[in-house]
Image: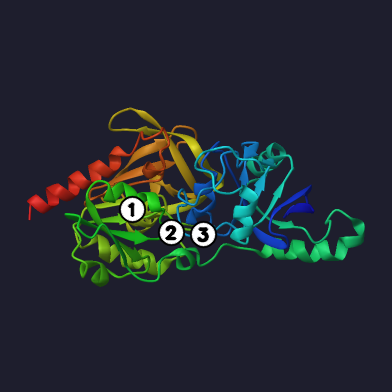
Amino acid sequence: MNAYLLLANGTVFAGKSLGCTGVTVGEVVFATGMVGFEETLTDPSYYGQIITQTYPLIGNYGMNGKDMESPRIWARGYIVREACTTPSNWRSETTLDTFLKANGIIGIEGIDTRHLTRILRESGVMNGAILTEFDPADAANAEKTAALLKTIRAYAVTDAVKSVTCAAPETYNAAGETHVVLMDYGCKRNIVRCLTKRGCKVTVMPGFSTAEQVAAQHPDGIMLSNGPGDPAEPTKVIENLKEIMALGLPTFGICLGHQLAALAAGAKTMKLKYGHRGANQPVTDFATGRTFITSQNHGYAVVGDALPPEKGAVAQVNANDHTCEGVQYTCWNCFTVQFHPEASGGPKDTEFLFDRFLANVKAAKEAR
């Protein structure tokens, strides 16, 4: 079946249907990872977005369910150059097409994804729609196309954290000696795994939890998870976070958690032209002078110059565009990073940050 991608600027790409049929509207972004497509699809940080994979062949090692970062796909659509129909891997359980259909996701394959990526790089991230119902380039469908373009241009990602966070606290590795509360703004399962394999008991808390609710768990430390959307939108989360940080517990923030902490400290965030999404983003650490290859997925960044100097300082920057990639706070026992140390970027170049966090937790416990 034919499928079409219609961008907000009126550009039409014609391809073949992948996954479900119908119409889906979202913010079209591109991700540069060569592997990790199952993790990408199930990352809550892609809520409200249509993902374009720049690597030409996707699904070649299949889908297995064990690599999912959450229970479902949060993206609104999927765009690939070619979807493999004959995956080869001993862990493979199903194809990409079947996986998308099982999750109710509309996709498209067979389009020039490099051309699309160039459009997004030059013009910036823009809204779009994947549809199988009619050809928007056909003059006979001009009225339908005009109506759809109006919907596309009006689309905005809203209530992102509210939509993806858990409904109630969930505990993992209850016998762990170190208790970490993980604030769920759209957390990936591997954050939990990185903590539990280090002997931690992890309580995942809803993103809108108050300081009183967090304190009632008697944690030794706090983690602020990744997540989707404009970090400045969930104002209640930011206000709660100010009080949570005032508890004085060692804290480690990742991605959206990094941005929310900065906003709670009085800094600002900005929307990037096309974001950082992929497994090859270089980050330079000021303390060591080293540059790490990291995995990233974000469309917003902390404005480093807007961070109040009495609150903390920028600790890492992106080696490509020099945007803020990390903050070391002096007003709180806290450090945060924009990238994903749990995502095996290099393959485990920055996972030591979990050890640094737990060392802070241990020191705080001994000092009580």
Can you identify the residue that label 1 sits on?
192
Amino acid type, residue under disc 3 in the picture: Arg
Q: Secondary structure at mark 2?
A: loop
Residue 274 lies, in percent from the top left, at: 58, 45
Residue depicted at x 41% and y 60%: 185
Q: Which mark is residue 237?
A: none
Is 186 left, or right, of 248 in this rendering? right
Residue on which disc 3 sits:
72
Measure the C-alpha gap from mark 2 to mark 3. 12 Å
The amino acid on which the numbered mark 1 sits, given as a three-letter code, is Val
Closer to the observer: label 1 or label 2? 1
Label 3 SS: loop
Q: How many marks?
A: 3
- Specify the color scheme: rainbow
List the residue tagged with mark 2. Answer: 186
The quadrant in which the C terminus is found is bottom left
- Label 1: state its secondary structure: helix
